[in-house]
Amino acid sequence: MSDSIKDYELLKTEIRKHDHSYYVLDNPQISDAEYDSLFLKLINLEKKYPKWVSPESPSQRVGISPVTAFSTHQHAKNMLSLSNCFNDEEFFDFDKRVNKSLNSSVQTKYFCEPKIDGAAVSLTYLNGILEIGATRGDGETGENITSNVRTINSIPLKLIGLKDIPEVLEVRGEIFMPKDEFTRLNKLQEKEGNKLFSNPRNAASGSLRQLDPQITKSRPLHFFAHGVGITQGISFSSQEEVFKKFESWGLPVNPLNTIAIDLDDCIKYFEEIDKNRESLNYEIDGVVYKVNNLDDQNKIGEIARSPRWAIARKFPAEEVKTKIIDINFQVGRTGVITPVAKLEKVFVGGVNVSNCTLHNIDELERLDPRPGDDVVIKRAGDVIPQIIKVIAKDKNRASKVKLPKLCECGSEATLNHAESWEVREHQTLIKKLDSIYEAKDLIKNANKGYTLHKVQQRAAFLKCMGGRSCDARIRGSFYHFVSRKAFDIEGLGKEIINRFLELSYFKDIQDIFTLENHSEEIEMLEGFGSKSVENLIQSINSSRNIELHRFIFGLGIEEVGEATARNLSNHFKSIEKLMSTSFDELITLDDIGPRVASNIMQFFENDYCKNMVSELLPHLKIQNPSLINQDSHLLNKTIVITGTLEEFKRDELKNMLLNKGAKVSGSVSSKTNYLIVGSNAGSKLAKANKLGVEIINEDQISDFLNEK
């Protein structure tokens, strides 16, 4: 019997159906031996007729050689992130905003899904054939990882079914690693002497970004579709319809997805998922509620980087118990010495935690943790590990932790005291401050009958007095300089910085930009090669073109954070003008009191710091903030943000305001033009109302930002 291309196509279709039954439905219809026989038949046909082979063939899941770097992919439609809520009341507030936007008294139906804790991707199908797989990236631009996506068996290379296949279909979803597979992978990593993955999310993300598709193929990755991007040749009326179509085309969707017809259904869904989350074979960190009707979604719209029509209800921060092994003291770039608890490693909030900062001396005194004590920790906001309770050892408890008299560098460690001050109007507390100078400055600027009250003196922090002789401070200044919000130099992690300092490739910050002189030596180091050195030098060179506010932040001036650096940038417009400013000019700026002004003046008067800046400048191309629209309605307006924002991340909102020429302040005064108010606003709102400051509620922010 002669072979025919028709039989070949039918064979591919049959194999795809069995792949779908096995990898997506977890319901194999034939034995492994029968499947292997079909696959071998396919391979033999393709060897015999190589011209028949097409990219969507089941045999072509891995057919691409390793790459040296991923190309970028511009999303045709932004991949948005979700706003969060943490309790019933916050979810009800979201529902009220939805109904207000729709001007409807009819209860909105919500599509409910578990929120998979994995790596977000976009899959683009053209006439049913997988063409592009891309990471989310920053939401606008990701990385093209098509060769790796093709290795994941639960992702169809060709959509099954013959009807309704659209010309263009962009599927959004999450790639994840099941818990049991993660455990097996880590056992294999340990057996082979490789580094263990900290959690399934990191394992999935790391596996997905391997330059060699064969490595990705070897990792147990799975996929759930959770949304749709651009489409051509088809339209949908609801989320529910989208997911039914996904299933009919062979795209895997979470079987726990459901429709909620009212708010009670939504709450019950969350409680049920929370109760059963430990029994699921994949990590989730909450549930997602989406307005089901797509026309309603379009009416409600989007805000900043998040849709108004969807929200993630996060699980409460997980709390676990572990034991303190020791209490150490770590030195930061400013010389502040922070107590840190070394813990028996424990898995909490999706990561392994073995260290937990105690923040300051006050916290150390309050909690009184000692080696051998048990502690309850949680990850605040699923980010920062925090000790919330110390359970003292019953017998033979260790002695109280003593503060070090010397820094690790051998220099004196001094205990700095700060006086806390309160500014009041009659009995109303206006603000608490750590400096009498800032308190007096607040009273002067407010021009009202405020009174000043001294609060009990307290120990603020330990500080190393060694200056540039302290290696820990030097290391800290390098870590800060290359960090994401400063120069963002990829590839210069802490371990590599420490190594280069030990080898004297780095002595001062400016040496980063002459590292290329050591390229041949670095190539000879263990863990390096010509390509990794080339990538590192390229990353350094890319950082040379930097915005002024990031440069100022990267300098590490004490108490000059992102917002202050941005205010300095917008006011002075160049580093030269900032360096030649006066104390009197500095304290006229919002958010800069006498203490911060003194820090800035002392930094630029210090010979070492002046020399560092002057040697850095020839290596950089600084972008001064000259592109702000001078006709912006927010130019030079002073804006304060208060309360909890549901649909904006505070940092993103600050940046949007600053980019429009506004000044973002931390306190309300007579100079304040607008107060942006979220939920749970406190004294700032009361004060703004007294001063007649214009109030912008959260549902007005979008119009406020885009006003002409």
Image: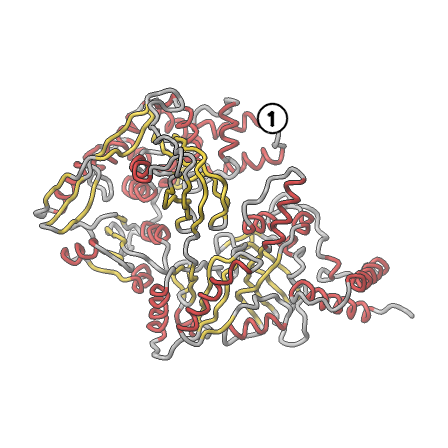
Q: How is the image coloured?
A: secondary structure
User: Residue 242: image x %, image y %?
Assistant: 54, 72
Q: Is residue 172 above or below residue 348?
A: below
Task: Say above or below: 10 vs 207.
Answer: below
Residue 617 in sight from this viewpoint: no
- Which kind of residue does numbered mark 1 sit on? Glu
Q: Residue at x 78, y 70 (%)?
A: 10
- Residue at the right extreme? 1
* Residue toward you, 321 or 642: 321
Q: Which residue extends farthest left? A: 449
Closer-to-camera residue (705/626): 705
Left or right: 543 with respect to 212?
left
Direction from residue 357 to residue 124 in the image, left or right: right
Residue 301 drawn above or below residue 439: below
Structural crowding at the residue carrying mark 1, measured as other residues with C-alpha within 10 Å and reported as few (<14), some (14–19) or many (≥20) = few
x, y percent for residue 352: 50, 44
Which image quarter: residue 359? Answer: top left
Left or right: 58 with respect to 327?
Answer: right
- The residue tagged 1 is 520
Q: Position of residue 49 (x, y in %)?
A: 84, 61
Q: Is residue 586 visible?
A: yes
Residue 613, placed above or below residue 295: above
Q: Report the quarter where the C terminus lies.
A: bottom left
- Within the image, what quadrant is residue 81 found in? bottom left
